[in-house]
Image (cartoon, helix red, strand yellow):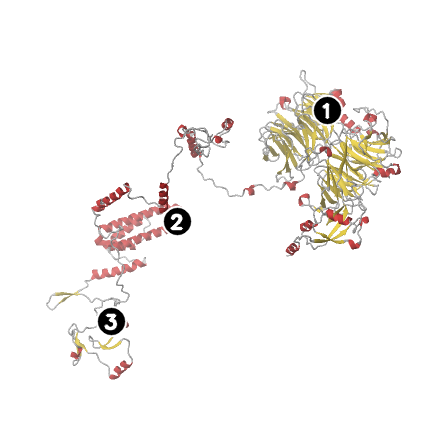
Amino acid sequence: MAPKSADKKRKASVQEELSDDEFNDLDFDGALSQSEDEFEAVSTDEEDEEDDGDNDASEAEEEDDEALHSDDIPSDEEEVNDAIEKLLKDKIEPGVEADGKDDDDDLTAEDARGQNDDDDDRPNYRVEKDANGNERYVYPEIDPVYDSDDSDAQAPENTIGDIPLSFYDQYPHIGYDINGKKIMRPATGDALDALLDSIEVPQGWTGLTDPATGKPLQLSRDELEILKRVQMNEIPVDGYDPYPDTVEWFTSFEEKMPLSAAPEPKRRFLPSKHEQKRVMKLVRAIREGRILPYKPPEEREKEEEEKEEVHYDIWQDEQPRDPHVMHIPAPKLPPPGYDLSYNPPAEYLPTKEEKEAWANQDPEEREKEYVPQKYDSLRKVPGYDMFVKERFERCLDLYLAPRIRKNRLNIDPNSLLPKLPRPEELKPFPTVCQTTYRGHDGRVRSLNIDPSGQWLASGGDDGTVRVWELLTGRQIWSVRLATDEAVNCVRWRPTKGTAILAAAAGEDIFLMIPPVLDPEAEQENRAILDVGFGHATSGQQAPLNVGQTPPAKWARPGTKLEDEGVLIRITVRSTVKVVSWHRRGDHFATTSPSGQRSAVAIHTLSKHLTQIPFRKLSGLAQTAHFHPSRPLFFVATQRMIRCYDLQKLELVKVIQPGARWISSFDIHTGGDNLIVGSYDRRLLWHDLDLSTRPYKTMRFHEQAIRAVKYHKGGLPLFVDASDDGSLQVFHGKVVTDLMENPTIVPVKVLKGHKVVSNLGVLDVDWHPKEPWVVSAGADGTCRLWM
Amino acid sequence: MDVTMADSTAAPETGSQVKVIFTTTEADLQLPESKRQLLVPADIRRYGLSRILNSESMLATPTAVPFDFLVNGTFLTGTLEDYLKDSGLSFETTVTLQYVRSLIPPVYQASFEHDDWVSAVDVLSQTSPAGRWSGDAFQQGRDRILSASYDGLLRIWNSSGQVIATSPASSLGGHSASVKAAKFLSNNQIASAGLDRTIRVWKYTESDDQFSGELRPTLELYGHKGPIESLEYEGTSKRILTASADGTIGLWSTSKSSAPAAPTELLPSTHSTKRRKISSSVSTAQRGPISLVPAHHAVFDPRDRTVGYSASLDHTVRTLDLATGLVVSTLATAHPLLSLCAVPRGSSPLLAAGTSARHIAMVDPRVSTTTTSVMTLRGHGNKVVSIAAAPDNDFSLASGSHDGTVRIWDLRSVRPAKKDEGGGIGGVSEPVYVIEREGRQGKKKSVTGDGCKVFGVAWDKTVGIVSGGEDKRVQINKGRDIFAS
């Protein structure tokens, strides 16, 4: 009974766990901790009960069981207490509580209760008086249930023994049963029955008479079968295996539950002396070489063959000798095959220059981390000198290693590229150099195409300004402005019908009229230049304070230059680097980075007047331009571009391209976009409406960018010129829609200028209408690309 | 299926024959009807076909006439077999071969050295326009070559390379700046124009020994405000047509009496403040233009002398009515145009316009046509600045380019344009011959023709192809009787 009850307990606990699981499934997180508590409470309860059961096992085990079965699953501490109380009650009044919960357990419980009732309510025997008057316990007849295999309870058996039945032929009975009562002869049928029986043999008819009963003996098919087997001398029972497999009860495997609990005998722990003797015998034999270790037969054969060959070291005590036909020197040992060896072959050893180059290189750039070194012997190889460093770096690697696994992005990199149109679709743009303008001695610093698109003006280190026929490359005109100063900038006056050229050489700005016009137009141009002289002499210029030098001096350059066509010389205080015209052609701005206070000056052509707009300028002014349509003025210092309103005279905007040193910038004809080139190799596109920061930064050049230029004739192109000798042409379309950003596509790299003393292309300009670019190179040429 | 069939039948057996039909458009070389069809070996080339045609049984020409053969609009370059294979045709197809007189490769003849870049060349010969206009006054064998140079001088050469006459310097009535265009008007008249915005008409006289001559200015024509880029002359009406960079076309008369007076404000002498006073010791008559039309590079119509055509840097080709001085029609092209040449063809000429985009656009100027760009001639490596039509046929051109070559084109050979060439607009032709500058032989050749640009080309029947350029030479190339006939 005890193992059964334990079983039940286990079952119950399983149930509880199950239901608990359900609860957990239904409830939310917040209750999770509570439910765990409950579970604990239940389990402790169970343990208690089990202890109880152990303590008074004999007495209250069943009740215990029942109580447990009938018990509800306690869900609270109070309920647990209730259950315990109930349990105690059940112990006092067992079997009271009925249980309707579990079907399986119900059945067994009922059975148990039925037995209990018999036991407890009345004794299962009667007390009767026997013949002697003694008490006699009469037990009720045991009623074997349907499939009880009590074979004794049969029909009354004849007890006459082994005598022929014929002895009783005269009697109506055929014998006596165990109680001494006569067993009456069964009635025999009449002759007709017998006849019928004999004709229609019933199932199992033998024709014999059962001596025990006197009835005809009938045998079933199975019984006949058994008889048959007996007759055949076979085993009568079907399916009996006379030779079953033996069960190996005692094996070498140690079972968990061995059949014998006897302790291991001592001999199992002691080394066998007999075995040791035999082993020692073998050992001795091996030592003496009588037993050889096993080898595959082929190997053995080979060894035996080798044993027969005898080798002699003929170079054993070789002395160095002069070469002789009859003397064969020992073959040289093959050199170590790689330069990491302590004794590498000579061709692996670096020369002195290579060693120096290696030492001078950055450790990251070195092709090898070591220099091959030669030592006479391994003994002379010193300790590894980089040991500590290497360990340190390894530790550093481990210490700085990222602790997060980096997820590799599985994205096609091409899909991340912005969808740009193909350059072929963005034609026209310049592609090849078609004309080279040769003639300048030294660098060409600046060039400019005149507004009609026929003439190219250039100025260079040789102090000359030259005018070229644009298409043929023929030099039309040349004038030497200075012998010791370079011409830093040449710019045509940007109005139609005029051919006035401004050129800056040193501290002078010259205004000139090259002979490319017909006499009538030339006369008009001269009038434009000369009108200011009248203005200056009539004293309309602002009066100067005593002692203050005027910001600039406007004068005639002298007859020699005047004959050449140079008409006005303006002398300012410091070297002018950049000249930039206002679109109407009456004003131009000059920038002299070294000029400090007077770095930027605005000159008025019609009044011969020079003004210095900035009293103070933070940073070195680099270049200055007028806005193409509005009265705005842009001044670039090294890092910033400031935009001033010329009418209100106030600072409107500060643009911060983020470049370290701005070299040049240009304003789109629309006026809302700006490109900036910088000496730190960056080309930046600014959208003035968008932000003060660049909309796009392009770093495609290997050297500083010297000049940038927008196409001014309606084509969406811009170009930059770099010290690496190349120009890059970009397609940059500015759309009128404010919501859409300009698309910038690099379309062409124009290479052709030679780099001379680290200077490549110094200036660049567009043809006013066509997609043609001219560039000024440090190699003394200008080039036309179309 | 068809293809495999064709392949199997086209399996080239040795000695397979192809049936050809000879046709031609040249009236004097017609074959009799019975001889037009012929079986020829499949591996025959142009030379073989040409010999067959020249043979006694066919044309029976007294001297061999070299022929070229057009198959389906392109010249036969390899064997017939190759052509059939390339175009995927069966060997059983009948091939129609149009035979034309072949262009003979021009051979270098001579170079005449100059002091400065040569900007323009012209030829006076029996067959040149000027020779024809002068009529009987032209003496046989007095072929002259005129070259205009950037040093402002005109030079007249005889065919053996001797300078017969040089124009006077600016102080003696010559050009004060570079000359950019010059033409013979007749055997004793020359017109030139250039950067000094004036057109000068010269009288040219030669001594009897034909080894010295004199150029005397007779007329100065004022009116242009910009450099004059080109100059054309029409002999029967005695009109000069000029194109200037100021965007105008000038029509001028060469006779003093009929020309209007010069605009005074453009005369150099009227301004006392002129920087370099030109004290010309020779006083020349000064006249103005008959009319100025706003356009650019101009030519006369070869048939109708009242019609002119002009090509401009602003991408347009204009048709001008010279009688009224009006622009009749304007055709826009895709590129700036730098040169123009009218190729006579039927009732209206075909215009060849050289572009800055390294090709020649063939433009049909008729208003009625739907497609204006007929054909594109591709091959030059730089701006095409000068075009000359062949003197005796209407299907070939010579073009001079800044890439330092003169290329000869045959308009009969056309292939459809490829996609990267902007397919769809007419056909594309490639040069038949390329003439390099002789002075540059052996030197490193640059594609863009740095230092050997060709500025002017003239093509004459007797003299050949004359070209001048940046290498300061006039170069004469001539096919050995370039059109054998």
Question: Label 3, label 1: how many angstroms apart (C-alpha)?
Answer: 150 Å
User: Would residue B232 appear left or right of B355 to someone viewing this image?
Assistant: right
Measuring from the top left, give residue A179's x and y in whole percent: 16, 72
Q: Which residue is mark 3?
A: A231
Question: Label 2, label 1: how many angstroms apart (C-alpha)?
Answer: 98 Å
Q: Are marks 3 and 1 on the same chain?
A: yes
Mark 2 residue element? loop
Q: Which residue is mark 1?
A: A479
* Residue at mark 2: chain: A
Disc 2 crowd rating (10 Å Cα; few below 14, some 14-19, many 20+) is few
Q: Which mark is residue A674?
A: none
User: Would residue B72 appear left or right of A303 to someone viewing this image?
Assistant: right
Measuring from the top left, give residue B154's x and y in whole percent: 81, 30
Q: Which residue is mark 2?
A: A27
Three-letter residue code for mark 2: Asp
User: Would residue B174 appear left or right of A195 to someone viewing this image?
Assistant: right
Mark 1 residue element? strand
* Residue at mark 1: chain: A
Three-letter residue code for mark 1: Val
**3 or 2: tag closer to the N-terminus:** 2
Whether residues under marks 3 and 2 lie with C-beta atoms below 8 angstroms apart, the answer is no
Measuring from the top left, give residue A402's x and y in whole percent: 45, 36
* Residue at mark 3: chain: A
User: Would residue A190 appear left or right of A523 to someone viewing this image?
Assistant: left
Residue B9 visible here: yes
